[in-house]
Image: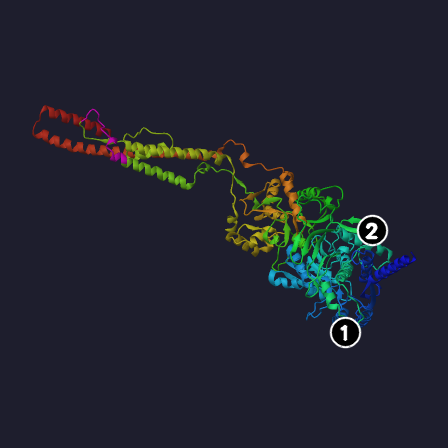
């Protein structure tokens, strides 16, 4: 019995000894740099935290205990780092971690290459030129991949002009793909460097703000990024117009609460997979330990957040544990730097390390088997938004704060893939609620006017008008507050010969104002430097001129319904028809008749249509009276019928047009269109200086408008006016025509009946709300304007401000009774006709009397001759009774006629 117990005790002792022999110890070394304000680096804390986590959880290394040896060196002391690594190799370590600075890294790396011990790095390192670092492993993403990721982001945002601000020379290497981009993509890249030896970058930021560099890439550490954000805020650059991209992978860990509502666009990459529950639990444990540790110097990090460097160090230690589990019968031996005898298990362990894979805090870790670099990785693309989310540990509890939004994932092989699509269903007030926008405008009736009040008014209450009502409606829809300011130089905005802008356009370019709500015309040249919303009013250029004086109808105004040419043509037509009728009547046999119907055998034939009768027939028909002459032949009836139809149309047209010419005052306008203006120089014309109308004529290629611009530019001091008010005064007081927008002319003519619009529209354009180029407000303002248009509010606002007392319209005047001054000329014509007829009658009487007198004289002469002949015959011989009787009767008649003389 006792022998059995002794046997069991012996077996138990042997098994216990065997178990103790199987529990191995693996030592790793860490060389960490210290700073004056940071005696213990974050890398060292993460290194210890990872070793402790592995030893607590035996699932990864059940039979091995992981121990470490830590050596601290001063920053930039490469000699001290070389001596410390030799001490660790003499102690016996399977891998060496650190240091972080490049000069110390090179010294440690050369020793590890010589003794064939894996050297593990978790910071960015300048790539080796000769690729002889065969025992070098770096878990930090490979630099060329990071550079491609930045270029993909720039391409996604379609930036054409960017500024790269780097902290040290290594930043240029990380940006090499972006620097090469202009030659391929037509991109403009400006490179600037942060001041060395000082964290005050405000002089540089001031210069960037002056040069209007809105798209900026900062390559710096997260400590410098924290300082830059504060300085950007103090410089007034934390606005919606700027977009900052930080290459540091730790921007998500900074406390960005002060900038959340600034509206600034901020983008960065994140390597940590905070959405993974395993990662979240590890970071929570890390946060709890950090709260128990002594307070660290102010770095801008949120309390309890793990940096990317700490997470990479944590993953690197776990990669060593994964590789060691696959290395059976591996022993760590003491190595001497001066003997140059390498570790015999070094190449094998190095290969196992490169082949190992692990889902760590920074995602899936896969190393390149050739150079030991991490080329396959994912980066989360983050954007700072008010509705973004991020986990933040406060008082030991995880709380969610609205900071970051994940908008995409970049993969080293697949490129950028967006995970957030534009959500158009969101309320348009999301990004404008409770913001105060600076609105620039200009005094212009009825758009913006000073409000008349007995009290002293301040702020926005000083103004009223169409644009103020529009601004109020936009504010109600979008939820923003606004402050109205008049443009400093009182101009809309035009470009001079040097390419410089003025007026409201300049204030938008300089970001002095957020919106320009005014009668600002959307033009091509303005659209290149600022953005416009959809037009809230459409219009065109027209001519404002003084209303011409009315002229009363003259005494002979009854002739006005027909032009002098038509009167002449009517008279010629009457003469022509009369002549044709005369010829045809002579030609046709049916117009000849026997004047002695009792003597059918008479050869005498007569025709009623003599030349005078034909003319009388034409005149009688023209006067709508008719005559006793009637055509009998078919040919003459055709002529008569056509002439009657002609006279019917002429008289009807004359009668219809006569009333207007006798009752309405005629307006004799010297100009009727822009062509009339261009063809003369007596009437001076121009536009508002530095306005869109002036720019239209200045840029126009149409010959008429080019001619008008030549006229205006040659008389700039007199043709161009400072503002509309001055132009209206000139139109009323001098012979001047003002070229301006039709809507303004409509408003002015409703209130001043001495002014009128001449001609139609020269062009077609619209008024829009101006914003700085790239402004996030433009699309939201456009949506709000379209909503107001559909609801009819834009039309109601125009009716409200444009409706005036009105002027009496000419076409609505009542017809006045006609006086002597209107139709007195017809009485003069009648009197003249009567007098003429009297004189013609007298002439006819005299002519007829003279003609009859000549006949009587001829008859008496003939009678006297015959009487003498008869007397001679009576004396010589006697005649018959019949002849004596006839001669006696003739003598008696002759005696009567001649005695009557």
Q: Where is residue 772 in the image (x, y as percent from the top left)?
A: 66, 52
- Above or below residue 299? Residue 629 is above
Q: 658 or 892: nearer the eye? A: 658
Q: Position of residue 757 (x, y in %)?
A: 56, 43
Q: Which residue lies furthest to the left in this view?
A: 877
Residue labelled with disc 2:
394
Q: Position of residue 79 (x, y in %)?
A: 80, 73
Neighbour class for label 2 at 10 Å: few (<14), some, many (≥20)? few
Q: Which of marks 2 and 1 is nearer the N terminus?
A: 1
The circle on residue 780 is none
Magenta residues, as a range?
584-600
Magenta region includes residue 375? no
Q: Which residue lies furthest to the bottom in this view?
A: 338
Q: Relative to residue 638, is residue 649 drawn left or right?
A: right
Q: Can residue 454 be seen in this view?
A: yes
Q: Quadrant of residue 234?
A: bottom right
Q: In which quarter of the image is the N terminus?
A: bottom right
What secondary structure is found at the residue carrying circle 1? Answer: loop
Residue labelled with disc 1:
341
Q: Relative to residue 870, is residue 437 drawn left or right?
A: right
Mark 2 vs mark 1: give the one in front: 1
The residues bearing labels 2 and 1 have C-alpha atoms spaced at a distance of 52 Å
Neighbour class for label 1 at 10 Å: few (<14), some, many (≥20)? few
Magenta region includes residue 594? yes
Q: 843 or 746: nearer the eye? A: 746
């Amino acid at each position: 019995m006792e022998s059995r117990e002794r046997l069991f005790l012996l077996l138990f002792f042997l098994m216990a000894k065997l178990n103790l022999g199987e529990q191995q110890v693996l030592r790793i070394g860490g060389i960490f740099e210290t700073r004056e304000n940071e005696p213990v680096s974050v890398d060292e804390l993460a290194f210890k935290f990872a070793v402790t986590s592995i030893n607590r959880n035996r699932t990864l290394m059940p039979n091995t205990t992981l121990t470490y040896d830590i050596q601290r060196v001063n920053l930039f002391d490469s000699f001290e780092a070389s001596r410390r690594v030799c001490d660790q190799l003499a102690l016996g370590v399977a891998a060496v971690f650190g240091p972080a600075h490049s000069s110390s890294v090179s010294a440690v790396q050369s020793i590890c290459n010589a003794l064939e011990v894996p050297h593990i790095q978790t910071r960015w390192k300048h790539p080796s030129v000769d690729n002889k670092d065969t025992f070098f492993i770096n878990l930090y993403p490979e630099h060329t991949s990071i550079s491609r990721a930045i270029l993909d982001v720039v391409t996604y945002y379609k930036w054409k002009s960017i500024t790269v601000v780097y902290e040290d020379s290594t930043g240029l290497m990380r940006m090499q793909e972006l620097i090469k981009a202009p030659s391929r993509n037509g991109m403009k890249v400006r490179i600037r460097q942060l001041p060395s030896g000082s964290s005050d970058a405000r002089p540089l930021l001031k210069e960037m703000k002056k040069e209007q560099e809105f798209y900026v890439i900062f390559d710096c550490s997260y400590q410098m990024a924290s300082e830059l954000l504060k300085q950007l805020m103090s410089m007034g650059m934390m606005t919606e117009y700027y977009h900052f991209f930080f290459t540091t992978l730790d921007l998500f860990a900074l406390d960005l609460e002060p900038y959340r509502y600034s509206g600034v666009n901020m983008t960065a990459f994140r390597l940590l997979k905070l959405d993974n529950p395993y990662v979240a639990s590890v970071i929570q444990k890390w946060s709890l330990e950090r709260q128990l540790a002594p307070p660290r110097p102010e770095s801008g990090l949120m309390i309890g957040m793990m940096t990317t460097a700490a997470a990479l160090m944590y993953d690197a230690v776990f990669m060593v544990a994964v590789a060691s589990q696959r290395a059976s019968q591996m022993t760590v031996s003491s190595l001497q730097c001066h003997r140059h005898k390498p570790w015999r298990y070094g190449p094998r362990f190095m290969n196992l390390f490169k082949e190992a894979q692990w889902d760590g805090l920074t995602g899936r870790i896969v190393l390149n088997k050739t150079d030991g670099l991490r080329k396959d990785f994912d980066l989360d693309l983050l954007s700072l938004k008010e509705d973004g989310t991020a986990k933040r540990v406060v008082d030991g509890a995880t709380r969610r704060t609205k900071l970051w939004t994940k908008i995409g994932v970049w993969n080293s092989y697949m490129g950028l893939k967006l995970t957030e699509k534009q959500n158009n269903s969101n309320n348009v007030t999301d990004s404008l609620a409770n913001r105060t926008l600076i609105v620039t405008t200009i005094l212009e009736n009825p758009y913006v006017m000073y409000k008349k009040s007995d009290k002293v008014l301040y702020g926005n209450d000083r103004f009223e008008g169409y644009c103020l009502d529009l601004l109020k409606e936009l504010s109600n829809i979008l939820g923003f507050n606004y402050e109205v300011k008049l443009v400093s130089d009182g101009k809309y905005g035009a470009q001079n010969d040097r390419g410089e802008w003025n007026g409201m356009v300049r204030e938008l370019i300089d970001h002095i104002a957020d919106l320009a709500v005014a009668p600002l015309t959307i033009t091509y040249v303005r659209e290149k430097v600022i953005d416009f919303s959809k037009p809230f009013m459409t219009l065109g250029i027209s001519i404002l001129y003084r209303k011409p004086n009315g002229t009363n109808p003259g005494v002979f105004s009854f002739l006005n319904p027909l032009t002098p040419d038509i009167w002449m043509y009517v008279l010629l037509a009457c003469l022509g028809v009369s002549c044709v009728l005369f010829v045809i009547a002579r030609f046709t046999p049916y117009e000849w008749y026997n004047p002695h119907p009792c003597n059918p055998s008479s050869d005498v034939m007569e025709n009623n249509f003599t030349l005078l009768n034909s003319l009388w027939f034409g005149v009688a028909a023209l006067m709508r009276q008719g005559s006793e002459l009637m055509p009998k032949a078919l040919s003459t009836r055709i002529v008569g019928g056509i002439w009657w139809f002609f006279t019917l149309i002429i008289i009807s047209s004359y009668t219809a047009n006569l009333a207007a010419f006798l009752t309405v005052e005629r307006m004799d306008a010297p100009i009727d269109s822009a062509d009339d203006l261009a063809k003369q120089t007596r009437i001076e014309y121009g536009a508002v200086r530095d306005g869109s109308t002036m720019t239209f004529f200045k840029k126009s290629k149409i010959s008429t408008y080019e001619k008008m611009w030549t006229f205006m530019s040659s008389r700039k001091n007199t043709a161009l006016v400072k503002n509309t008010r001055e132009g209206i005064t000139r139109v009323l007081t001098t012979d001047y025509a003002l070229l301006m927008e039709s809507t303004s002319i409509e408003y002015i003519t409703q209130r001043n009946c001495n002014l009128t619009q001449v001609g139609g529209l020269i062009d077609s354009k619209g008024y829009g709300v101006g914003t700085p180029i790239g402004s996030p407000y433009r699309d939201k303002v456009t949506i709000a304007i379209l909503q107001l248009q559909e609801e009819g509010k834009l039309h109601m606002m125009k009716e409200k401000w444009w409706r005036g007392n009105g002027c009496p319209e000419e076409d609505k005047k009542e017809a006045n009774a006609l006086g002597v001054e209107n139709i007195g000329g017809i009485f003069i014509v009648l009197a003249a006709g009567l007098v003429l007829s009297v004189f013609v009658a007298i002439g006819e009487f005299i002519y007829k009397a003279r003609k009859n007198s000549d006949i009587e004289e001829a008859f008496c002469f003939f009678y006297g001759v015959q009487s003498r002949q008869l007397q001679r015959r009576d004396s010589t011989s006697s005649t018959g009774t019949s002849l004596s009787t006839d001669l006696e009767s003739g003598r008696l008649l002759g005696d009567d006629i001649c005695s009557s003389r």
